[in-house]
Structures are given as C-alpha cells and as structure tokens.
Amino acid sequence: MLADRFRKLLETGDRAAVEDFYSSDALLDTNVPTWRFQRKGIDEIAAQYAEWSAFGAPEVLGLREWQASFGAVIEFDQREPAEDGGEAYARQLHMFFTEGDKVVRHVMYCTGPWDPETEARQKAEAPMYEP
C-alpha cells in the first residue's frame, strides 16, 4: 500500500525514501494556510522534505488510505518538533496520482502547525466525533 511507503518517507525524510516514492519528474503541489507552492523533481522535493524535518521527524498519529483509480488519498495527523523546542500538531490530506509504483503528482492540503494553545482551544470549542 502507498500509505506504508509514505509513512516511511515522513518518518525518515531521507532522499532514498523520496526516490523510492516519487518519479524523477514528479510534482508536489502544497496548499497550506494562506499559501501555496510547488516543487518539481527529486532534488526539489527532497529539499522540501529536509526543510519540513529540520527540527526532527514528525510522529505520524492516525493514518487512513483510500485507494482510487488515479492512485490514493491519504489523511493523517501528526505531531512535529517545533523550532522553539516544543511540539506542533497538524492534520493533512494528500492526493497521490501514480504511474506504476511511483507518484507523479502529489497534491497536499495541511491545516498548518497548531501550537498547544490552539490545539487545546480547538478541542474545547469544537469537539470532534471521530479522530
């Protein structure tokens, strides 16, 4: 399943995992709060993962995969080390378009990192029925 390879990539962030996951000319289309950017090719995508894990690898919490005719959709949440030494929480949705066993297009939507105060406020003001 694609989710297992993606989890490995998230937890290691290393170039070998990027090369295993993406085609050489893959496109990463990232949508974060108030911003959107793209990276193309292994070098740019590997550099982006290195930037995302600059303070340490995230801890992937729940991860769900839905296979689709174009590839897969993966939803997960994570805790990640923050620049200040603390932790941040984020939820993400990913659409992976594949050819064979390689991702050729990856569209990502992220809530952005929530500091502990924002996470506590969300839990208090908007309780969830599902994780």
Image: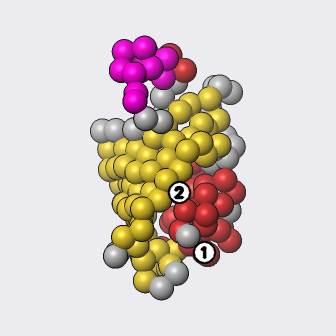
Total labels: the figure holds 2
Q: Amino acid at mark 2?
A: Gln
SS class, disc 1: helix
Depth check, front residue: 18 or 48: 18
Residue located 44% across and 46% down the image = 92
Q: Is residue 31 above or below residue 130?
A: below
Residue 56, how many percent across, how many down?
69, 43
Which label sits in the foreground, 1 or 2? Answer: 1
Q: Is residue 88 above or below residue 57?
A: above
Specify whether 14 is left or right of 73: right
* Residue range highlighted in magenta: 119-129
Which label belongs to residue 19?
Answer: 1
Specify whether 101 is left or right of 38: right
Residue located 36% across and 15% down the image = 125
Residue 4, how many percent across, how many down?
61, 63
Q: Is residue 37 above or below residue 67?
A: above
Colour scheme used in the picture?
secondary structure
Q: Quadrant of residue 105?
A: bottom left
Q: Amino acid at mark 1?
A: Glu
Residue located 34% across and 38% down the image = 33
For mark 2, does the 10 Å Cα neighbourhood hold few (<14), some (14 to 19), or many (20 or more) residues? some
Single out the residue that lies furthest toward the front.
Answer: 129
The residue that label 2 is drawn on is 48
Residue 54, how many percent across, how many down?
64, 45
